[in-house]
Amino acid sequence: MEVVEFKVRLHCKACEKAVRKSLLKINGVKCVEIDMKSSKITVLGYIDRKAVVKAIHKTGRRAESWPTSSASCPRDDYFSPRLPKGFRCIIPRCGVQKFEN
């Protein structure tokens, strides 16, 4: 299962409907979430990123990768020193969780 996020400029409900319909036709797509305010499209399923981009392009829109904030978020600070040994935060920062061995 993969989550793919794109920035696509949509200016009306008709644009949203066309893109959603096109994405739901792709085999393996389980869920499509569209946020009109931030121009963000999130697709969940067993899919190929290129197939999603191609489907969006067919509707006449341009798809860009959603910018990640990984540069501004420290990735080595997942485990709090205040937690007892063996316990860890179950909510990952930056969408990635690091496990201790």
Image: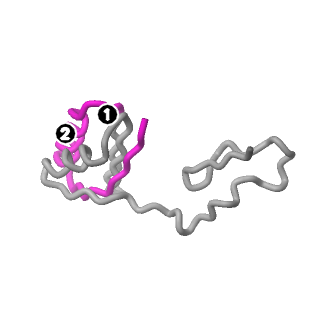
Give the position of the C terminus as an image quadrant: top right
In this view, the residue farthest toward the bottom is: 72
Give the Cα distance between marks 1 and 2. Answer: 11 Å
Q: Amino acid at mark 1?
A: Val
Task: Identify the residue at horizontal 53%, vertical 63% (top origin).
Answer: 70
Left or right of 90, for residue 84: right
Task: Identify the residue at horizontal 32%, vertical 57% (top origin).
Answer: 7
Residue at the disc numbered 1: 29
Q: Looking at this view, is 70 or 60 the one in front?
A: 70
**Between tags 1 and 2, which lies in front?**
1
Q: Is residue 13 magenta?
A: yes
Residue at the disc numbered 2: 22
Label 1: how many Cα within 10 Å (few below 14, some 14–19, many 20+):
some
Left or right of 69, for residue 17: left
Q: Which residues are magenta?
A: 1-30
Element marked by disc 2 = helix
Give the position of the N terminus as an image quadrant: top left
Element marked by disc 1 = strand
In this view, the residue farthest toward the front is: 101
